[in-house]
Amino acid sequence: MSQRILLLPGDGIGPEVIQEAEKVLKKVISIYKLDLQLESALLGGSAIDKEGVPLPESTMKLAEQVDAILLGAVGGPKWDQIDRSIRPEKGLLGIRSGLQLFGNLRPAITFPQLADASSLKKELVAGLDLLIVRELTGGIYFGEPRGIRTLENGERQGFNTYVYSESEIERIGRVAFEAARKRDGRLCSVDKANVLEVTVLWREVMDRLAAEYNDVELSHMYVDNAAMQLVRAPKQFDVMVTGNMFGDILSDAAAMLTGSIGMLPSASLDINGKGMYEPCHGSAPDIAGQNKANPLAAILSCAMMMRYSLGLEQVADTIEKAVEMALDAGYRTVDIYTDGHKQVSTTEMGDAVTDILASL
Ligand code: IPM
Ligand code: MG
């Protein structure tokens, strides 16, 4: 039976990078004669424009049915003034939580070809291979109560709730321990246990799990220190595990170590390994529609999809190899451009990777 992939191009540069990822998918489908069916649907601002809501029911239904989802990005200034309950981001958060995609894997790998493009010194980042495991369907992003209320004195007050239950901590902990086990066997759990009770519990659960994973070395770090260590000596880390909000912030910082956030794919998995795959970069409205965006994060997200949800490890390896070969051949979108290379557009980069795939 054929496996189904849902494309959600979304907003900003989303459609541009997904178009290139689609080229790559079609190419591997034809090379490997894969029985994969591509479908697409609306999400985010583009869905608001056409259907009035960021996550139409038809999109959610398809998302539930397919085997894997590839998302571009959502949001942009056009929808900034819109009512909070239907902001484009709600569409993304709605899918994550509706499908219980709690396990977010955000690798930060510095391709040797791009060590020069990082804002950090080359020797600090060359060879970096870090995995951030972020809890994605809980914590302060989803905690209730939340809102903006008016106090008796007439002043308004904003409030959110930071909660994690033991079972939520345990299931993300297991994802991280398992990932560390397959890598260098080192896991750093990031919390704020010196201030926040919710992360005191987080630390306790991680310690309890560590007893089951004797082959993994667990350490703990406060989030402020972790942010500093990431830019001071990032290669000390193998796998980091943290909650939703700290993971959001640390993964952006980690992304920059690699030269450009335009290179980073991600996977968001449910308990059975069904997943949504997305570039980490967001909708980048400032460069949308200019054929400038780097499609490699979206293309590398396809590789992750092959590996984690579709059981096609060899296809994943081939896509990653083609990306490396495109970099070796000197192709650079503007975000990763350094002297002496060929500056290319979004579509030219997609074509380069597709042509390389055809030649392998
Ligand atoms: C991310 C993004 C999202 C998040 C936004 C767009 C809701 O920043 O995937 O990191 O905060 O999770
Ligand atoms: Mg983010």
Image (cartoon, rainbow, N blue to C red):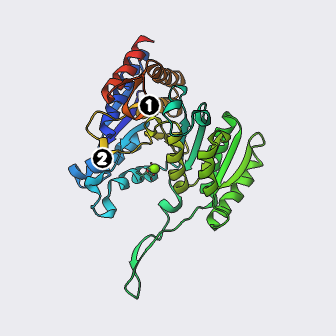
Q: Say which amino acid is labelled 2.
A: Ser
Q: Residue at x 37, y 56 (%)?
A: 90
Q: Which residue is mark 1?
A: 302
Residue that appears at 57% across and 37% down: 121
Tag of residue 58: 2
Task: Say whether residue 251 is left or right of residue 262.
Answer: right
Label 2, ligand 1: CB separation under 8 Å: no
| Of residues 103 and 342, the one drawn nearer to the viewer in this rendering | 342
Residue 270 drawn at (x, y percent): 52, 45
Q: CA distance from mark 2 to mark 1?
A: 23 Å
Q: Residue 28: where, in percent of width, then height?
A: 41, 20
Q: Determine whether 197 is above or below 48 in the image.
A: below
Residue 246 figure quarter: bottom right
Q: Split into 4 quadrants, where in the image is the N terminus? A: top left
Residue at 36% in and 37% down = 6
Q: Amino acid at mark 1?
A: Cys
Q: Position of residue 261 (x, y in %)?
A: 45, 40
Q: Is residue 192 left or right of residue 114?
A: right
- Dot 1 lies on which element? helix
Disc nearer the start of the sequence (2/1)? 2
> Where, by quadrant of the figure, is residue 179 drawn?
top right
In this rendering, which labeled residue sits more in front, label 2 or label 1? 1
Q: Residue at x 70, y 41 (%)?
A: 186
